Amino acid sequence: MPTDPEPPSPLEVAIRSRFDAGDLDGAIAKALEAYADELFGFLIGLARDRTQAEDAFSAACERMWRGLAKFRWDSTFRVWAYRIARNEFLRTTRAVTKARKNTPISEIASVRAAVSKMRSTTPLHQRTEVKDRFAKLREELDPEDHMLLGLRIDRKLPWNDIAKVLASSEDEPSAREVAALRKRFERLKVKLRELAKEA
């Protein structure tokens, strides 16, 4: 049975307050100011290519901006943002391009600011020089396994939130799905230990 959700953080409360007041631009600006670095770090860790990560990040920011009005708050904004970032990464990986309509991305100030910031800063993995043997082994994993490790180890997301990010539907994850993720995570840790021994 899934655990009870934790109370929202002050940041999530601030984002939700702006949303509830009808200030969608303010809500997205606050959210991107807080979460842009970690989302971009997540994407660059998956893509291992700055250009692809920038493309996925830009598309994710635009999708968040366009979808915020319909966000149902079934999860935190942070979990929703990770889910969108994951989906946009998978879209760019599969080379699926869709025409963007309505407001051009260049006219959305909060999105433009977040993308510009990411393009002008040193990636997290280079700042912290996370290039040890374990990190190299993780890079050999398929994208879904890499995401699972990143969300649990690097981002420290709770299991229910990870299940929401990785789910193929918008439904609340079942206890069985959460348990399956935990088992998959344990198998991945064993696999990485074995690869480390071989290396």
Image (cartoon, grey):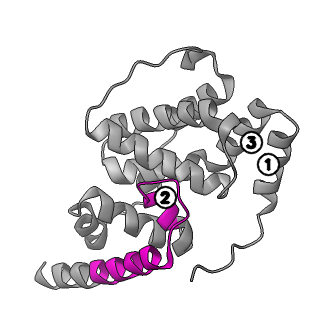
Residue 181 or 174: which is nearer the viewer?
A: 174
Q: Where is residue 5 in the image (x, y as percent from the top left)?
A: 69, 73
Task: Tell me if residue 131 can be seen.
Answer: no
Task: Tell me if residue 195 can be seen.
Answer: yes
Q: What residue type is labelled 2?
A: Val
Q: Where is residue 89 in the image (x, y as percent from the top left)?
A: 37, 43
Which quadrant holds the N terminus? bottom right
Which residue in the structure is indicated by mark 3? 30
Q: Which mark, residue 165?
A: 2
Give the answer, above or below, for where 43 lies relative to 131. above
Q: Where is residue 2 in the image (x, y as percent from the top left)?
A: 58, 79
Q: Which amino acid does label 1 sit on?
A: Arg
Prevailing SS of the magenta stretch: helix
Instruction: State yes or no: residue 22 in magenta.
Output: no
Say what secondary structure mark 2 lies in.
helix
Q: Most extreme residue toward the left, as rendered?
A: 198
* Magenta stretch in the rendered image: 162-189
Q: In this view, does 129 lie to the left or right of 69?
A: left
Question: How far apart in space, not on screen, are marks 1 and 2 (Cα)?
Answer: 19 Å
Say what secondary structure mark 1 lies in.
helix
Mark 1 or 2 closer to N-term?
Answer: 1
Q: Residue at x 34, y 52 (%)?
A: 46
Neighbour tally class for label 1: few under 14, some 14-19, many 20 plus, Cα within 10 Å: many
Instruction: State yes or no: residue 185 in magenta.
Output: yes
